[in-house]
Image (tube, rainbow, N blue to C red):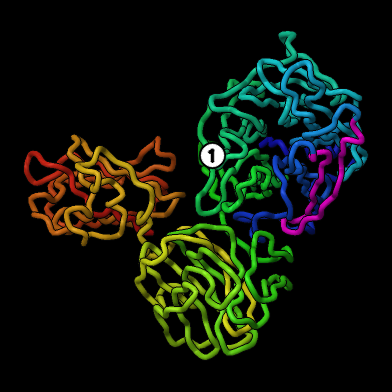
């Protein structure tokens, strides 16, 4: 198994430096940045990574207007949790030809030295000075200095703007640089000195390798003998910035696009792209490191650094990446949280707040259906502390937001309520709460259904129905108490009683009418009469639902015509249900013929899938008629 970082480790060892993280250090094996994304403070973008000695290094672009992009910072960590900032590792003062737009640093070590490739000046044509440069230093944190006194690549070749470089050393020692903007990608060979371009066996210096959809941000790594090229698509200031990839058997391709593996999540962040890949040496643990823009930010330069786990399917393809929301505060900070009242601090791996009348802290998220877990410890006071969800219009004040809140109190109760600059109690239940004791609080909300759990995650303490708020931010809050919070986790709904399909994006064959579209089959209701169903008169009608991420499914339920009050003659007679991880390759898991029932249940053995497709071959009990599906439900 040969990997980009593993090759870099070998190169550092050849330098006489220790490259593998020390045995005393725990291997970072995380589902995401468990201490929270962004993992460093400030506006940064275009991260690239390296492993030097016992530390993991990230070198990003400083995300500012081009004229202010005159320096590069770096960050290092021994555990991917606590990070140290190294300012000004390279500045334009050390590069005579660079004056602005210093972008996308690419680090690598060889020949006993540390190299940093960078783009500068954002040239628009071949008459302008700028392009891709290379700097060198004697230590990872610099200071780096220009290695050759001129750009290494200073011209547009094959239409590729000389920016967004990535350097890769193959297992035979040959170094390559992948680069290019303006929708074109090139690869060049680097000579052993790492500061001059070599030639390919055919005598050429540049080879175009542009895959379909490529815009910029080339990234190369190797796993199990195959070469993975990743790149960014879409506009870097827009929400649709994303990452796709290809696999080849050669470092020069050909590279054919396989899939888009990272994209915006309207619940978490937008503009997710320009990635690098980190492999923990000696393991098959991989992370994708990238930048993204908070949901509420409109400034194109307001980008932050994040990482998530990257996994592979059995055939070596990359599984689509989910941007997870976690924070265990082990890094001693609360980056990404915004407070409204109260005095907040992080210490001993907890997020603490003093006693106040409604102090709250929110993440910039926008979840609708969710499961939200948090450890809650009431430290003093007689009020309550808990979680806020589906919140909008937050401000300082006791109930100054629109949204829901669930909290626990040492008075011996758990409460659920709705805030709108006032308080409406939706439910309350008795439960033992001892000060300075930590309790696991969970809220699962699907459509109007809200369930609140305390420690016991099988039986809710409160079950309520309220449709006032559909989506909004998540956070934590106190009322007339002091508290500490830890192990925050927000994601799609989970639990045996959670309909994974409810509220998810649905598509299908042409509907009978505008009010009978596929979204009606995932709205959680069969009681809305004739317009509360998916109806399609198309032959071989289908309904397809995107669960958002791969989910474990233990059963399907289908509500047919009679469930919605129609005649039994309209119950679906024959249909199949298939599942897929990518909406391309499908596996049939349910096949029904001769059905007459109003609702059908289909147990499974715990399959994993993101996409569900119901296909109808006999829509009614007779030989004709339209398909009528009132609900398609999927349960974990």
In terms of image quadrants, where is residue 424?
Answer: bottom left
Q: Residue at x 38, y 65 (%)?
A: 496
* Residue at mark 1: 240
Residue 588 left/right relative to 249: left
Q: Nearer the viewer, residue 344 or 110?
A: 344
Secondary structure beneath disc 1?
Answer: loop
Picture quarter with the N terminus? top right
Picture quarter with the C terminus? bottom left
Q: Residue at x 68, y 49 (%)?
A: 305
Q: Residue at x 64, y 68 (%)?
A: 339
In terms of image quadrants, where is residue 464?
Answer: bottom left
Q: Nearer the viewer, residue 412 or 251?
A: 412
Q: Residue furthest top?
A: 203
Residue 77 left/right relative to 567: right
- Point out the stretch of residues depicted in magenta: 68-95
Question: Number of labelled discs?
Answer: 1
Residue 443 left/right relative to 152: left
Residue 116 screen position, x and y as percent: 83, 35
Residue 20 screen position, x and y as percent: 79, 47
Residue 167 left/right relative to 426: right
Q: Residue at x 59, y 45 (%)?
A: 310
Residue 110 screen position, x and y as percent: 85, 33
- Using a 10 Å C-alpha cutoff, classify the residue at mark 1 as few (fewer than 14 neighbours), some (14 to 19) or many (20 or more): some
Residue 74 belongs to magenta span: yes
Q: Nearer the viewer, residue 358 or 599?
A: 358
Residue 530 belongs to magenta span: no
Q: Is 238 drawn above or below residue 557 in the view shown?
A: above
């Amino acid at each position: 198994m040969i990997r980009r970082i593993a090759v870099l480790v070998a190169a550092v060892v050849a330098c006489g430096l220790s490259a593998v993280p020390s045995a005393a250090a725990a291997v970072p094996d995380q589902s995401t940045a468990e201490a929270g994304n962004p993992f460093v403070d400030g506006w940064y973008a275009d991260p690239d990574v390296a492993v030097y000695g016992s530390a993991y290094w990230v070198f990003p672009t400083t995300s500012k207007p081009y004229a202010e992009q005159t320096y590069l910072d770096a960050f290092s960590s021994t555990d991917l949790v606590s990070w140290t900032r190294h300012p000004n590792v390279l500045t334009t003062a050390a590069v005579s030809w660079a004056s602005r737009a210093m972008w996308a640093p690419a680090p690598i070590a060889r020949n006993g030295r540390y190299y940093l490739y960078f783009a500068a000046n954002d040239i628009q044509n071949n008459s302008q000075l700028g392009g891709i440069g290379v700097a060198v230093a004697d230590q990872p944190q610099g200071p780096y200095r220009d290695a050759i006194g001129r750009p290494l690549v200073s011209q547009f070749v094959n239409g590729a703007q000389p920016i967004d470089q990535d350097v890769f050393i193959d297992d035979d020692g040959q170094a390559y640089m992948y680069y290019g903007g303006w929708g074109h990608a090139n690869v060049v060979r680097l000579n052993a000195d790492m500061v001059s371009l070599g030639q390919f066996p055919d005598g050429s210096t540049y080879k175009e390798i542009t895959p379909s959809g490529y815009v910029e941000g080339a990234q190369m790594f190797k796993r199990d003998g195959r070469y993975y090229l990743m790149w960014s698509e879409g506009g870097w200031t827009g929400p649709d910035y994303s990452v796709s990839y290809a696999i080849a058997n050669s470092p020069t391709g050909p590279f054919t696009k396989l899939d888009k593996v990272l994209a915006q999540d309207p619940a978490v962040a937008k503009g997710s792209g320009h990635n690098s890949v980190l492999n923990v040496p000696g393991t098959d643990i991989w992370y994708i490191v990238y930048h993204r823009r908070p949901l509420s930010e409109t400034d194109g330069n307001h980008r932050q650094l994040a990482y998530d786990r990257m996994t592979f399917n059995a055939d070596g393809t990359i599984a689509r990446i989910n941007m997870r929301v976690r924070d265990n505060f082990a890094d001693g900070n609360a980056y990404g949280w915004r407070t409204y009242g109260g005095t907040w601090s992080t210490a001993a791996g907890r997020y603490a707040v003093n006693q106040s009348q409604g102090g709250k802290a929110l993440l910039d998220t926008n979840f609708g259906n969710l499961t939200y877990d948090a450890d809650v410890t009431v430290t003093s006071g007689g009020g309550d502390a808990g979680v806020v969800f589906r919140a909008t219009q937050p401000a300082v004040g006791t109930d100054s937001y629109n949204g829901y809140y669930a909290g626990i109190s040492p008075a011996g109760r758990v409460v659920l309520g709705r805030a709108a600059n006032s308080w409406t109690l939706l439910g309350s239940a008795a439960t033992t709460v001892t000060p300075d004791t930590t309790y696991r609080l969970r809220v699962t909300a699907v459509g109007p259904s809200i369930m609140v759990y305390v420690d016991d995650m099988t039986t809710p303490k409160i079950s309520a129905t309220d449709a006032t708020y559909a989506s909004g931010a998540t956070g934590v809050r106190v009322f007339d108490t002091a508290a500490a919070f830890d192990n925050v986790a927000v994601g799609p709904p989970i639990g045996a009683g959670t309909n994974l399909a409810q509220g998810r994006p649905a598509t299908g064959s042409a509907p009978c009418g505008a009010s009978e579209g596929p979204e009606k089959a995932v709205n959680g209701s069969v009681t809305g009469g004739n317009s509360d169903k998916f109806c399609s008169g198309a032959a071989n009608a289908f309904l397809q639902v995107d669960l958002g991420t791969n989910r474990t499914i233990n059963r399907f339920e289908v509500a047919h015509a009679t469930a919605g009050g129609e005649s039994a003659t309209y119950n679906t007679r024959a249909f199949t249900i298939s599942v897929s991880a990518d909406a391309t390759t499908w596996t049939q898991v349910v096949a029904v013929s001769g059905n007459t029932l109003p609702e059908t249940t289909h147990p499974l053995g715990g399959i994993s899938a993101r996409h569900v497709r119901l296909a109808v071959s006999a829509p009614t009990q007779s030989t004709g008629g339209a398909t009528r599906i009132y609900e398609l439900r999927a349960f974990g």
